[in-house]
Image: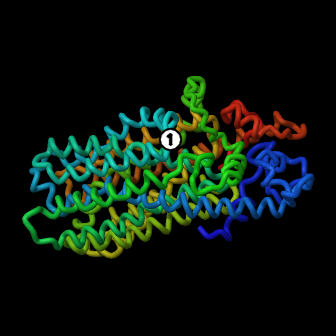
Amino acid sequence: MGSENFDIFHDKDRGSRTASPGLPNQLPEKDGYSQKVSKVGTSSVSSGQPGDDHQRSAAEISAEESRLVRKIDLRLVPLLIICYFLQYLDKGSIGFASILGIIPDLNLHDQQYSWANSIFFFGYLIFSYPTSVLIVKFPIGKYVSVTVMIWAVILMLHAACTNGAGLMAVRFFLGIGEATVVPAFAILIGLFYKREEQPMRQCAFFLGDGVAGITGGLIAYGIAHINGKLATWRCLFLIYGAATVFFGVILFFALPSGPSTAYFLTKDEQKLAVQRVHGNGSKKTGKYKKSQIIEALKDPQAWLLTMNTFCVNVATGGLSGFGNLIIMGFGFDLFDTLLLQIPFGVSQIVFVSIGAYLGSCVKNARLFAMLFFMVVSITGTCMMFYIPAEHRAARVGGACLASAFSASLPMATSMVTSNITGFTKKATVMSMVFVAYCVGRIVGPHFFLDSEAPRYQTGLRTILSVFSIAAAIVIILRLYLMRENSRRDKLSGDSPAGDSNAAEDDMDLTDREDMSFRYLM
């Protein structure tokens, strides 16, 4: 994410409100953005000389804002990437443990391994709503860092398990511990970045998934060579957990809770950081509004995004738990299977990067990108399922293509943060999406039947089905948003737009209450 791309971010996907501010260096003095910047403080709008009321040029304001965005990128985004990397690594550690001996050591049978994967998301699901309330009530930075340290300790307790019941207990509480990170990070992105800037940053911390696949496989490869009294899968949980505890301590002091309290910004920068995102609908009010919860539950867009997320994560739930077992079933040994995590991780990074580019640099291309990922994943899954067993390389190539669906979740998340306004509504819809995420992950592993190992025919057929349904939902969502934008255009007519973005944000209006709002696609 080089700073040279920031002008591209501002050039694309403008006009999302009829009263939407454009580029600072393209606006007259009376435009909404100029008026907002004038509120930031004397130091950000005047020359600083006594009695001099001369406004700085739009180019100077734009340069100052670009410097601010670069500073936020350097101090915030790396923390999100590392934390999400550790979350994905810790959550998926059971997949590595499955080929390091945990199944025979704990005598897991009769779909117990499937349930060990699923029960994590029962904890995740149960805590999804409470954490959305706590995110509003407490400083996000401190709250997230505490949950990181809690889940790290729980992960280390996996090493003490002696049977399936103990494994399921720690997996359940691990799900509770990890439930906060993704919705909290989505809110943080909305607090620090404009709507058109968000997809690139959303995708950036989802790159942690691909990095975790690469480094997790390499770490597991090293752990697999440990010859000691402690089983290698137990060593894996202890090492992963210790690393996360260490980072949680760093996060406690380094992760900001919002632009107005960000320690790495000056007072004037804090004011500008708050003012520049007015109109995002991300203003944290500290009040949880029941009316916005009801509106979220009645919003077709919210339900379409929720259903899409469910479908995608049925596939994720199956492949995250059984992916390594499927690869071993292609005819690879333990060490080769671990090393093959590298091309899978690389392909995931490539697809997420494509999504970030299309979402940030091509106008209204987010849903097209999601559809593209579904088509590629369908192709890859067909290759895994239908190519004869003797063509191992081609089947591995299909598995790499099938990973394209992983780029859909950050795109769906960016749709929520960009298209849903009202702080409580946004938090509620984010919770709906991640409830669907949990339910999909709970259901997915149970289509992979022990009796069908190592091909898992029912599981792969299910994945093909849900990918197809997800693609259809994306098409329906785009048609719905196009119709809604057209309806609002007709209602607004040719009347001049007012400068109401900042006032609307202060009022904490939702996207359905604010008829000047235009949806991004």
Name the residue located 60 percent from the left edge and 43 percent from the top edge. 477
Coordinates of residue 280 in the picture (x, y in percent): 67, 44
**Could you tell me which residue is drawn at 38 percent across and 58 percent down?**
247
Residue type beneath disc 1 = Pro
Q: How is the image coloured?
A: rainbow
- Name the residue rendered at 24%, 60% in the picture: 455
Q: Is residue 142 visible?
A: yes
**Could you say which quadrant of the image residue 508 lies in?**
top right
Q: In the image, what residue occupies the spot 83% across and 63% down?
A: 59
Closer to the camera, 116 or 161?
A: 161
Q: Position of residue 495 (x, y in %)?
A: 90, 37
> In what element is the residue under mark 1?
loop
Position of 238 relative to 485 (above/below) = below
383 or 330, which lies in front?
330
Q: In this view, does 426 lie above or below 247?
A: above
In the rendered image of this protein, does residue 262 appear above or below residue 358? above
Q: Quadrant of the N terminus?
A: bottom right
Residue at the front extreme of this rendering = 50
466 sits to left or right of 201: left
Mark 1, other Cα within 10 Å: few <14 / some 14–19 / many ≥20: some
Point out residue 245 in the picture as x, y percentages from the top left corner: 32, 55
**Residue receiving disc 1:** 139
